[in-house]
């Protein structure tokens, strides 16, 4: 089953947007006094931790976007053997 390209691109865009939001929390975001009051969820993390998580989200979003456009990181690059035997009679489908 193949995932439609528009779905993969939109999912990658959402991941990239969330990574940008985490960068905003790391660099700008609410002041430290307001962060100390909230102390729950993403505001409980330090700015450095938010920055590290943001970098991971951007890497994952970039990889999702690349796979949506055809990059296959786990594809075998070696060509099949030229002297492979021909498929015999039966109902098996030859997979390459």
Image: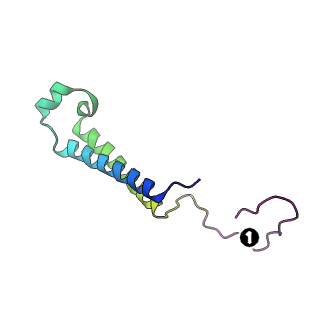
65 with respect to 76 (left or right) = left
Dot 1: few (<14), some (14–19), or many (≥20) neighbours within 10 Å?
Answer: few
70 with respect to 37 (left or right) = right
User: What range of the chain is rendered magenta?
Assistant: 77-96
Figure coloring: rainbow
Position of residue 30 relative to residue 15, above or below, is above
Q: Quadrant of residue 81?
A: bottom right
- Determine the main secondary structure of the stretch shown in magenta: loop
Percent across and percent down for residue 80 are 70, 69
Position of residue 7 relative to residue 50, above or below, is below
Percent across and percent down for residue 7 are 44, 53
32 with respect to 95 (left or right) = left
What residue is pinned by disc 1? Answer: 81
Q: Residue at x 43, y 61 (%)?
A: 66
Q: Quadrant of residue 47?
A: top left
Percent across and percent down for residue 85 are 83, 69
Element at label 1:
loop
Q: Is residue 82 magenta?
A: yes
Q: Residue at x 28, y 39 (%)?
A: 49
Q: Residue at x 52, y 54 (%)?
A: 3
Q: Residue at x 17, y 31 (%)?
A: 35
* Residue reaching furthest to the right: 89
Position of residue 95 relative to residue 12, above or below, is below
Percent across and percent down for residue 17 are 30, 50
Q: Is residue 28 magenta?
A: no
Q: Quadrant of residue 52?
A: top left
Check the picture and name the quadrant holding the C terminus: bottom right
43 with respect to 53 (left or right) = left
């Amino acid at each position: 089953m193949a995932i439609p390209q528009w779905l993969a691109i939109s999912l990658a865009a959402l991941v990239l947007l969330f990574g940008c939001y985490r960068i905003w929390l790391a660099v700008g975001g609410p002041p430290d006094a307001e962060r100390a009051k909230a102390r729950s969820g993403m505001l409980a993390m330090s700015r450095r931790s938010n920055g590290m998580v943001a970098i991971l989200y951007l890497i994952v979003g970039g990889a999702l976007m690349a796979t949506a456009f055809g990059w296959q990181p786990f594809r075998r690059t070696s060509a099949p053997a030229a002297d492979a035997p021909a498929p015999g009679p039966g109902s098996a489908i030859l997979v390459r």
